[in-house]
Amino acid sequence: MATLMALCMKCRTNNKPTMREMKDPVVTKNEKGRYSAKGTCVVCGGNMFKFMSAADGEAMMK
């Protein structure tokens, strides 16, 4: 599985969230057809969430 990068709100630098790798992402599709991923930050262990494009969501769900 490819690595997924997302913003971590706990790992802030200068009051801005930083891009971190998402550990164990779970990709879902809502009733409107929008894909999203939930996982944890590899650095601090905080919760992460990211909206994804349809192409990326389909690729991650396989």
Image (tube, rainbow, N blue to C red):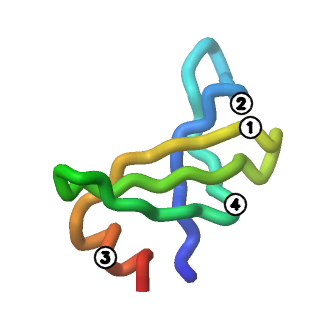
Which residue sits furthest left? 32
As helix, strand or loop, the secondary structure at mark 3 comes to helix
Which residue sits furthest bottom? 62
- Circle nearer the viewer, 4 or 2: 4
As helix, strand or loop, the secondary structure at mark 4 comes to strand
Which residue sits furthest top? 15
Cα–Cα gap, marks 4 and 2: 15 Å
The first of marks 3 and 1 along the sequence is 1
> Contact, CB < 8 Å: mark 3 with mark 2?
no
Where, quadrant-wise, is the N terminus in this rendering? bottom right
Q: Is disc 1 surrounded by few (<14), some (14 to 19) or many (20+) residues within 10 Å?
A: some
Residue at the (36%, 48%) spot, across then down = 51
Q: Type of residue at label 1?
A: Gly
Image side of residue 35 versus residue 45, left or right: left
The first of marks 1 and 2 along the sequence is 2
Q: Nearer the viewer, residue 51 or 33?
A: 33
Q: Is residue 32 above or below residue 54?
A: above
Which residue lies under the disc numbered 1? Answer: 46
Residue 4, image x, y percentages: 53, 62
Q: Quadrant of residue 12?
A: top right
The first of marks 1 and 4 along the sequence is 4
Residue at the (71%, 27%) spot, across then down = 10
Which residue lies under the disc numbered 4? Answer: 23
Q: Type of residue at label 3?
A: Glu
Q: Type of residue at label 4?
A: Lys
Q: Is disc 2 surrounded by few (<14), some (14 to 19) or many (20+) residues within 10 Å?
A: some
Cα–Cα gap, marks 1 and 2: 9 Å
